[in-house]
Image (tube, coloured by chain):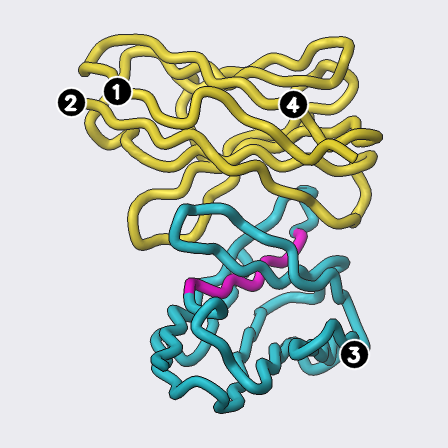
Chain colours: A cyan, B yellow
């Protein structure tokens, strides 16, 4: 089956720092989404990005489908950015397969 | 624009009992998918409902069943609860079955004692 690996597994940042999260997937995909899971468990949509680059405020994402990876950039990090970041790919069976997650802690 | 809603927020059951979780999709969405998230792990796909039928199913036993109503809302039923069923259950909605964005509800945290 499809494999989705994220790196790094854990990341600690000083407030104001920038970071890059990576998502590697083993098969071609039709859909890739990035989510932020807050401490209460809510999965918040960040990007729907099967290919190309998108930006939303301090966040941006790039997916290179031909090389089977996606990157999430966080600039000028804030304490509210803390949580777990997941990438998820839509499999041929039409369901989202989640990566292993990156736990981000932003300290003031 | 109403987002995805789930009820209840929390639930405590004992082994062997049955539980029903509920989900209302985002306004305009017609497809509902259910996921189980164990502590410290990513969500895992349980099944997906579209046009009131189960369309896709993940690697979960028959104890997990569901239903979709004509208004697109959905229920997840789990019978003969096991301790290992303790998890956050997430519902996601989308439009159609294509490769479009899925939006998640706040989840129901189930504890089995």
The count of marks equals 4
Q: Nearer the viewer, residue B60 or A57?
A: A57
Co-location on one chain, circles 2 and 3: no
Mark 1 touches mark 4? (CB < 8 Å): no
Q: Nearer the viewer, residue A90 or B93?
A: B93
Binning the other alpha carbons within 10 Å of mark 2 as few (below 14), some (14 to 19) or many (20 upward) gives some
Q: Quadrant of the C terminus of chain A?
A: bottom left
Q: Nearer the viewer, residue A15 or A87?
A: A15
Where is residue B14? Give x, y as percent: 19, 15
Label number found at residue B24:
4
Binning the other alpha carbons within 10 Å of mark 3 as few (below 14), some (14 to 19) or many (20 upward) gives some
Q: Which residues are drawn in magenta? A: A83-90
Where is residue B33? Give x, y as percent: 62, 32
Label number found at residue B12:
1
Label 1 – label 4 distance at C-alpha: 21 Å
* Residue drawn at point x = 78 percent, y = 75 percent: A54
Q: What secondary structure is the stretch in magenta mostly built from?
A: strand
Task: Look at discs 4 and 3 and give the one toward the viewer.
Answer: 4
Label 4 – label 2 distance at C-alpha: 27 Å
- On screen, residue A50 above or below B70: below
SS at badge 3 = strand
* Residue drawn at point x = 40 percent, y = 80 percent: A8
Residue that numbered label 3 is attached to:
A53
Binning the other alpha carbons within 10 Å of mark 1 as few (below 14), some (14 to 19) or many (20 upward) gives few
Label number found at residue B77:
none
Chain letter, disc 2 residue: B
**In this picture, residue B94 sits left or right of residue B66:** right
Co-location on one chain, circles 1 and 2: yes
Co-location on one chain, circles 4 and 3: no
Mark 1 touches mark 2? (CB < 8 Å): yes
Residue that numbered label 2 is attached to:
B113
């Amino acid at each position: 089956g499809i494999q989705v690996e994220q790196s790094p597994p854990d990341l600690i940042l000083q407030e104001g720092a920038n970071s890059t999260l990576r998502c590697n997937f083993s098969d071609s995909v039709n859909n890739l989404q990035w989510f932020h899971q807050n401490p209460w468990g809510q999965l918040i949509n960040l990007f729907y990005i099967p290919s190309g680059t998108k930006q939303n405020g301090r966040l941006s994402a790039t997916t290179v489908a031909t090389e089977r990876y996606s990157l999430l950039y966080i600039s000028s990090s804030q304490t509210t950015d803390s949580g777990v970041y997941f990438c998820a790919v839509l499999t041929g069976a039409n369901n989202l397969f989640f990566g292993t997650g990156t736990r981000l802690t932003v300290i003031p | 624009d109403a987002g995805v809603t789930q009820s209840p927020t929390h639930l405590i059951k004992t082994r062997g009992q049955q539980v029903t979780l509920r989900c209302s999709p985002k306004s305009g969405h017609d497809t509902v998918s259910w996921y189980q998230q164990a502590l410290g792990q990513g969500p895992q796909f349980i099944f997906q409902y579209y046009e009131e039928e189960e369309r896709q199913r993940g690697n979960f036993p028959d104890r997990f069943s569901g239903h979709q109503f004509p208004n697109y809302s959905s229920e997840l039923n789990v019978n003969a609860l096991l301790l290992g069923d303790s998890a956050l259950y997430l519902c996601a909605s989308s439009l159609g079955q294509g490769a479009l964005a899925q939006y998640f509800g706040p989840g129901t945290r189930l504890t089995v004692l």
